[in-house]
Amino acid sequence: MILDLTPEQRSFKESIERFAREAIAPQAARIDESGEFPIDLIRASVAHGLLGVTIPAAWGGAGRDYVSYALAIEAVGRASATVAAALVVTNSLVAELIAYAGSAPQKGRWLRALANGQALGAFALSEANAGTDAANQQTMAVRSGKGFAIKGRKVWVANAEAAQVAIVFACTRPGLRAQGVTAFLVPMDTPGITRRARDESLGVRGLGCMDLALDITVADDQVLGAVDQGFRLAMWALDGGRVAIAAQALGIGEAALDAAISHAKTREQFGEPIASYQAIQWMLADSATELAAARLLTWKAADAKDRQERSTFEAAMAKLAASEAAHRAADRAMQVLASAGYRRGSLVERLFRDVRATEIYQGTSEAQRMIIAESVLSDSRI
Ligand SMILES: Cc1cc2nc3c(=O)[nH]c(=O)nc-3n(C[C@H](O)[C@H](O)[C@H](O)COP(=O)(O)OP(=O)(O)OC[C@H]3O[C@@H](n4cnc5c(N)ncnc54)[C@H](O)[C@@H]3O)c2cc1C
């Protein structure tokens, strides 16, 4: 077992770290304050290979492995949680799912555009009464001529403000729950889509989250994969997305640890830098250790994603461990900075708000524990 990066992975990581430090980090506070979707940074990230990261070169992507992708998302997440989340949605939840399940014409129409930045993707699964219970889809897709009439309402659709295409999930066989859900590829300019701004978000502000009211007609060739197979596809996409959210969380956690270290070295109380006190040292040590442990789980899950058809268990463990480690790191950073952190507009205050979403979206921590427990109880763990 080799627990080190290849020269290609290392050089990609360094190039994204440079881009994140120089171009993204200086914009992060403005994105948070304004709540504006960072479309310029998403466009700029194309030149750095941050769209279509794992999509095969034949479809215009960079064809990189999942560990490289996780390294890139961690680097971006360290600079701006919002930019990282927007990249995760379009890469993992949209482009990868089209590459996996799309027909050749669907790939031709969308994959190249998603990889070269002409299109951005959104993933519309959640509804008012279908959050953790995502199989409880109330959006209905009913046969109509050579296609489907889709009616319903989706909530919290990230990237929706700027996206050109959404993968929309809808019930095609009422009563069958997961067995009766179909995924549709829907251009966002389809007549009958009304985008509604969401309430103000606590963190990852600027992610372009909107609710979608749908009253649309789609053709048969907009079905992604097969009819009634959509729930399985959503779960497949989330296997990748959760690895990427684990990486995003690590980035936020590392940024919090950096802020805590730097403050501890410079803030003096009782005539000494507070870093000289063991109470402070232990907080830094615990954050560094927990983030390092979560990173190993994240790399393991990323590697599993490349090697296995499904990596649900590994992805759940990585997301659970990384999001909770990052949450604790942000919490400790707040304690180390004390009043200097507990101030609107401070870096740690933003990280403290941003990190919370990583325990909620793409499946809550409880949902990850359910997956892990099911696997542990059926004794199928590795
Ligand atoms: C910033 C942000 C961006 C998002 N982006 C998207 C997106 O792009 N696309 C999309 O489709 N969705 C998106 N979502 C929605 C997100 O996926 C859901 O919020 C999440 O799945 C949880 O659903 P819920 O909020 O309805 O909570 P609920 O499902 O109502 O859960 C409430 C609480 O009950 C717990 N719970 C529920 N069921 C169980 C159970 N059986 N056992 C134990 N505990 C349980 C949950 O863990 C949670 O603690 C986004 C959300 C946020 C906050």
Image (tube, grey):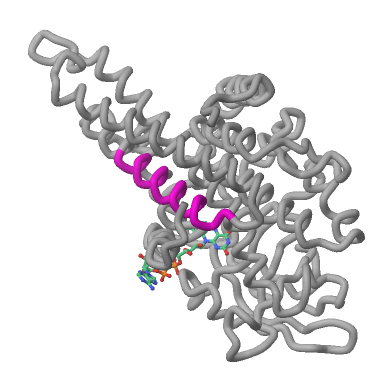
Asked if the stretch drawn in magenta spans residue 322, the answer is: yes
Residue located 30% across and 41% down the image = 328
Q: Residue furthest left?
A: 270
Q: Quadrant of ligand 1?
A: bottom left
Q: How many badges with numbers are in the image?
A: 0
Q: Quadrant of residue 215?
A: bottom right
Position of 295 relative to 371 (above/below): above
Depth check, front residue: 130 or 209:
130
Q: State whether the magenta stretch is mostly helix, strand or loop.
A: helix
Q: Is residue 306 left or right of residue 346?
A: right
- Residue 78 inside the magenta-drawn segment: no
Drawn side of residue 231 relative to residue 372, left or right: right
The residue lying furthest to the top in this view is: 271
Residue 382, given in percent of the width and then of the height, sits at: 47, 51
Q: Is residue 184 left or right of residue 357?
A: right
Asked if residue 306 can be seen in this view, the reply is yes
Please report the bounds of the magenta region as a residue range: 311-328
Horizontally, residue 248 falls left or right of residue 329, namely right
- Residue in view at x 63 percent, y 65 percent: 234
Q: Position of residue 166 (x, y in %)?
A: 72, 62
Tell me which residue sits at (72%, 42%) in the image: 54
